[in-house]
Image (cartoon, rainbow, N blue to C red):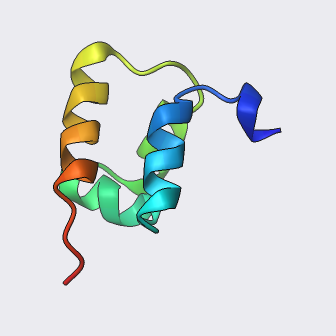
Amino acid sequence: MIQDKANMKIRLALKGKDIPYWQIARKMGVSEQTLVRWMREPLPEEVEQRMTALIESWVLK
């Protein structure tokens, strides 16, 4: 169930803006597989803040 997963705020923000993991991973300079692994556990504060900032400023091109 999605409510039990780590990084729920990030997951919901990505879903809300319809941003696929591969696109946010590319913006962060990592592979999609790395991002998926990161999302399994609570993110370090620095990574969470960076990802949140990217999501908030997301503009589809």
Q: Classify 60 as above or below 6.
A: below
Q: Is residue 29 visible?
A: no
Which residue is depicted at the point 31% across and 27% down? 48
In this rendered view, identify the residue nearer to me: 18 or 36.
Answer: 18
In the depicted structure, whether residue 29 falls above or below residue 7: below
Observer-nearest of 25 and 31:
25
Q: Nearer the viewer, residue 42 or 14?
A: 14
Q: Does residue 57 appear in this view? A: yes
Residue at image coords 29%, 15%: 45
Residue 55: horizontal and vertical position, in percent? 28, 51
Q: Residue furthest right?
A: 1
Identify whether 59 is placed above or below 27: below
- Looking at the rendered image, the quarter that the N terminus falls into is top right
Residue 12: horizontal and vertical position, in percent? Answer: 53, 46
Q: Position of residue 51 (x, y in %)?
A: 27, 40
Give the side of residue 48 with respect to residue 34, left or right.
left
Snapshot quadrant of residue 17: bottom left
How many numbered discs, if any? 0
Q: Is residue 46 left or right of residue 41?
A: left
58 vs 25, nearest the viewer: 58
Looking at the image, which residue is at 19% across and 84% down? 61
Residue located at (59% from left, 30% from top): 40
Whether 2 is drawn above or below 28: the answer is above
